[in-house]
Image (cartoon, coloured by chain):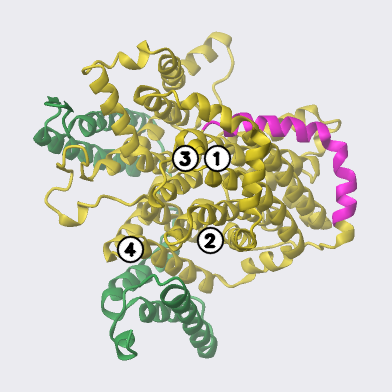
Amino acid sequence: MGIENLFLGFQVALQPHNLFLAVIGVALGTIIGVLPGLGGANGVAILLPLTFSMQPTSAIILLTSLYWGALFGGAITSILFNIPGEPWSVATTFDGYPMARNGQGGQALTAAFTSSFVGALFSVVLITLFAPLLAEVALKFGPPEFFAIQLLTFSSFVGLGGGNPMKSLVSILIGFIMAAVGLDIVTGALRLTFGFTDLMKGFDFIVAVIGLFGIGEILLTMEEGLSFKGASAKMSPRVVLETWRTLPRYWRTFLRSCFIGFWMGFKPGGATPASFMSYSFAKRFARNPERFGQGDIEGVVAPETAAHAAGGASLLPMITLGIPGSPTAAVMLGGLIIWGLQPGPMLFKEKPEFVWGLIASMYTGNVIGVAMVLAFVPLFAAILRVPFAILTPLIVSVCAVGAYSVNGRMIDIWYMLIFGVVGYAFKKLDYPLAPLVLALVLGDLAENALRQSLIMSHGSLLIFLERPISGAITAVALFFFALPAITPWVRRLRGAPVAAVKPRET
Amino acid sequence: MRAADLTTAVVLMAGGVLVIWDSLRLGVGWGTDGPKSGFFPFWLGLALIAACLVITIQAIRRADRTPFIPPGAMTPVLKVLVPATGYVLSMPWLGLYVATTLYMAIYMRWIGRFPWLSVAVVSIVVSAVTFYVFEIWFLVPMPKGPLEAYFGY
């Protein structure tokens, strides 16, 4: 059954029109991934308004290809410029940049792209196998189960996200509160508008993403006063082939990283810890761990494979449950709603050509992606050699155009600017931004699920614990929420030092 | 960093109070057919205040004296923020395309000290490409001003 559906998907994804969109998406995505201040979530948000008039399947193919491109682009800046474009590329800089400085930039890039490809492919294969099963199970879910899953999503930010759990919680709450602003569709009441007509429509998550991630990132970059001292890479077919010949040696690292990535990435916010975990595992099991950090190719393979396996895995809950695993997936989910599709398990039944077209496009997008970045690395890297005085106003105006085009409202550009300043301040104060965006996107869905559940139970919160599936999920969620309070206590019992190195959240 | 942490927490708590106040107006209890409109925001506001209180206590205990913005870093940030604000301010009057041209030009000349020729070429090309992509290719209208009106758009 799965194979047939996948075949149907390939018929959609391999249409010349959709292949063309995939190429455009990968190219734009790589550029966006290379540019400071524009990441995957941002790129998808800016491009989203342009897809409103497209066919949903073509639109999602364009956006997922953009996502893959942005993931590949992040590796270029990490290796050649020592600037992680995305938080999960931080671990790639450890060995990638030293390799580039030793004149092995070509090898490092080839290894990174190939690992990304392998990791993503692994996830896509697992998605192909498991997505229909998961959707089948999810079809039996009622509102309590969906609310429990939302709870689990957000609890994992608090419990597993690292950093200050209270600040993660505050980010989530701000996101939910902002989602509540405006007209309450259920009762028709105006909430939190305080008499301002501009607030009636609420806050658009696309504008929030553009402001928080785009403008905020630019401000942060300027403050740090970046200077791009790029290493150059010689890419030739010979270098690529020679690197490919050495890579099978690391099959254990590949396999381990794939599993780590998929397992971590399935849960929200998992790509960054997955890349670090995979790196440290690779180091622990390596024959000569002292070479790590000096430019060991295995140190590039491990985090890249895991990050991309996680990046792929984060799309699984989005397709099957309608719960995004990452900010980028959240923006895509918002797109689904705008295109008139109801995200969730019913998609598999109602729009098989959409779901399977999307899954098949993950295969094609990755193949196109790896081929394009390998062929055009110097071109993409050249973008960062464009002077900053051109890039900065260019990025700001692209963001402004993106924010305006969502609803055609001037006020959205102001919101974008304000969100930019807020994003800058929050990032400096270690308030994570990803949970805020996810809560803003999911706010209405979560509230509706909560309302319907409470109506079912006549106002008793126990409904979430009494039903078997939602009970199990809620229990895990409560455990994650409690984890930050438990962990220091357990550590003290074991006599281990309370120290956790936290990757910087971007 | 401590002062900034405390300020943020206090501002957010004030926001929480506003949320609770508005929720109480809407009703936080059980209506005729389920929870009233204020139910969900009320608990969110309450949780926000509680979480911010914890953050406040943490911040008071921790003697973090590092400044929020390292000395000298304020200028580059403002150099982005001030022109961007001017850009957004001028947009309703000039239209997006003229505003973008001017913004690019001013930024490139002022910060980048580019020669006038490259300033002119880059800023005009950027606007022209944006115009083509949005107005003609994807038919997404942008704010327009007197110049566009003169050309009949």
Tell me the chain of label 3. A
Same chain shared by disc 4 and disc 2: yes
Q: Could you say which disc has been placed on residue A413 in the image?
A: 4
Q: Earlier in the sequence, mark 2 or mark 1?
A: 2
Residue placed most toward the observer, A23 or B59: A23
- Asked if disc 3 and disc 1 are in contact, CB closer than 8 Å, the reply is no
Same chain shared by disc 4 and disc 1: yes
> Gap in Å between the C-alphas at discs 3 and 2?
51 Å
Give the extent of the magenta segment.
A240-267
Tell me the chain of label 4. A
- Which of the chains is green? B
Q: Amino acid at mark 2?
A: Gly
Q: Nearer the viewer, mark 2 or mark 1?
A: 1
Q: Nearer the viewer, mark 3 or mark 2?
A: 3
Tell me the chain of label 1. A
Q: Which residue is mark 1?
A: A315
Q: Secondary structure at mark 4?
A: helix
- Which of the chains is yellow? A
Q: Could you say which disc has been placed on residue A377 in the image?
A: none
Q: Position of residue B15 (x, y in %)?
A: 22, 41
Q: Secondary structure at mark 1?
A: helix
- Quadrant housing residue A189: top left
> Gap in Å between the C-alphas at discs 4 and 2?
26 Å
Q: Position of residue A53 (x, y in %)?
A: 43, 62
Q: Residues within 10 Å of mark 2 (few under 14, many from 20)?
A: few
Q: Position of residue A22 (x, y in %)?
A: 62, 58
Residue A232 placement, left or right of A238: left
Q: Residues within 10 Å of mark 3 (few under 14, many from 20)?
A: few
Q: Which residue is mark 3?
A: A350
Asked whether residue B13 is drawn in magenta, I would say no
> Gap in Å between the C-alphas at discs 3 and 1?
19 Å
